[in-house]
Image (spheres, coloured by chain):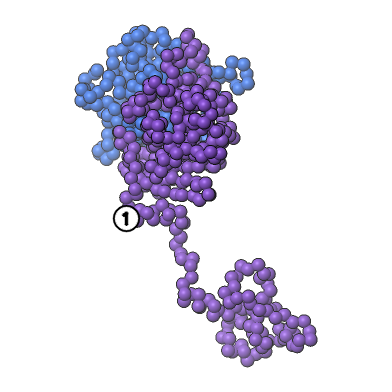
Amino acid sequence: MAESVCRSLRDGALEGELAPTLTIKDSLASPFGFNVFSHILVQLSSQIVAGKSQSQGMVIVALSRSPSSYIDLLKMNGVDVESSKKWIHILDCYTDPLGWKDKTRKSGDITDPSNQILSSYKTVKDVNRLFSVICDLGRGLVGGSKSRFCVAIDSLSELLRHSSVQSVASLLSNLRSHEQISCIFGLLHSDLHEERAVAAVEYTSSMVASVDPFHHSVDGQGSNLGNSSRQNLTKGKFNVRSKRRNGRVRVTCEEFRVEPSGISFAPVSSVDGAAVAVAGLIPKVQFNLQLSEKERVDRSRVVLPFEHQGTGKPIQIYDGRRSLEDSNNEATPISGGKKEDSGRGEIIYYRDSDDEMPDSDEDPDDDLDI
Amino acid sequence: MEQQGLDLMDQALGFHSNKAQQQPWPLCGRFVLVEDCVDTSGAFVLHHILKRSFTSHPSSAVIFLAFANPINHYDRVLRKLGCNLASQRDTGRFFFLDMLMLQCPVEGEPNHDGLAAVFEKIERVINELSPENKKFVTVIVDDISCLELAANGSSNDVLDFLHYCYTLTSENGYALVALNHQDIYSDGERPAFKLEIEYLADILVKVDPLATGLAKDVHGQVMVLNKETQKQHGISSIKVNNFHFKIKENNTEYFYAGTRT
């Protein structure tokens, strides 16, 4: 649920625990991840300003959107960005991530010195330095060692493009372990990376929210929005998987709708909505793997070939061509030697239970009587 | 602006027939990505936008980065469409950056900043524009696949370069138009390169052959995906237009499927 995700981020980290981390995952089939990211950004910012969250400040690492767009977003949603108590800082990794513009800018420094909430960062490939800069900026916002701040990374995909999976995973781990970081959330485009990269980021997150299309396309060409149904253009499914401290995993599913004013969430609208999320986890097969009562009884009655009947009589080998009564009249000399008298070696086979499963630990050839 | 009817391509790109609604250049601040394939070239879309950009506003300017063809090629094509590139160049509205011989230094060599130098050149051209021509600037890249060749196959460098060009749209309100050959990247080791650029694009124009094969009167189909992006919130609505086209000597006709007998 989007509400519970926002609540987890608002409540933040417990003493001595890793900070809750949310990865928002989308793909070109439903490219609304940024809408979710902005929604959470606005919610958390309002709570910070109102003093209702554990975080007292926020550092936004802007890689795929300009810092001014975030300032406009917050202003449009009534969040006071220019309050006297500075609570937000935007690290601009968007305008000049590699320092190319330094060569042409005559003034050199494009940061407006009067703008207190913006810093530019021009070495986006240096993830270690990025970590130190984020921590310094956060400490500058909230001060003392007991106060915490949160971190928003608008494109983990951009970070993965500029550096290795290991660097990004270790950045997230280091941020999570930092004693002053309350929570972290970031956006990842899952179709841009190998599965192992996406898995690495998911492992370092305590919550993974997938933005999925409303209808999955049947053929393989559906990765492009243009090929998908009309409904996929405005709404989709919001699946959240959160890891609890005790190891339990909670999965929820909602529908979202994209509007000019933002994004809205609602419970899944189908009739068996509650079962949809759970049903989605169980693979659908065409046949029933369970046994009914009658089938269980019938199975216990089946006479297995080559198995000792255990009655002391000569072993009847049922070869499938005749009924059991007919073969009773014949003595099979093959097995005769085995069960003559107790003086010689004898194999007596006792079944442990009537419904012993075929794949038990015993040597499956034990019951052969050849 | 020219008094002529808007065709389907114009409408799909955001031109409105109602003059009151229309901005002078609706591609301002947007990145248009044209994807084509071997069977159907999408160059006609670039030519269409190039011509429209001159007619949109008397003080618009175009910076054309040519990796695929020399200027004479575009001169001939646009002349057939009724546009004189030479006179636009003389009046300071058309800047042709010939990148055909560009070969970036290999990584590790000194001055390994080949594409950074190209971006620097673009910025220099922009700085030298007269103030009235700076408002409606369109940067056109033809094409991304050749750009990647010039960058020694480094798709990361190409993506960095496109990111920097994209910042021109958000910081200065310029338009960015680029052509990419989708079938080079659609399968194999690097589908992510094509997808990265598709994520960046505000308007995606996909040119494909007809599913039924070659035809005399219909040369292919176009899908225009126009993301109404509010830069703050993200995508607010998506409009998809599908239609067919026929390339003629002096223009291109666009029509809905099945409306041609």
Residue at point 54%, 18% (across, down)? B114
Q: Which residue is mark 1?
A: A271
Residue furthest right in the image:
A343
Residue at point 43%, 45% (across, down)? A240
Residue at point 58%, 86% (across, down)? A324
Q: Is residue A135 left or right of residue A75?
A: right
Residue furthest bottom in the image:
A329
Locate the C terminus of chain B and report the quarter of the image it occupies: top left
Residue at point 48%, 35% (across, down)? A183
Q: Chain A drawn in what color?
A: purple
Q: Position of residue A247 (x, y in %)?
A: 53, 49
Locate the N terminus of chain B and report the quarter of the image it occupies: top left
Q: Position of residue B91 (x, y in %)?
A: 34, 8
Query: Quick one: A127 or A207, which is closer to the camera?
Result: A207
Question: Within 10 Å of the Cα at label 1, are there few (<14), some (14-19), or many (20+) other Cα atoms?
Answer: few
Q: What is the number of callouts on the image?
A: 1
Q: Is residue A128 left or right of residue A332?
A: left
The residue under label 1 is which amino acid type?
A: Val
Q: Which quadrant would residue A255 be assigned to in this image?
A: top left
Q: Chain B drawn in what color?
A: blue
In this picture, is A50 found above or below B66? below
Q: Position of residue B259 (x, y in %)?
A: 25, 38
The subunit letter for the residue under badge 1 reads A
In this picture, is A347 found above or below A210? below
Q: Is residue A178 visible?
A: yes
Q: Is residue B158 visible?
A: no
Callout 1 secondary element: loop
Q: Position of residue A315 (x, y in %)?
A: 66, 84
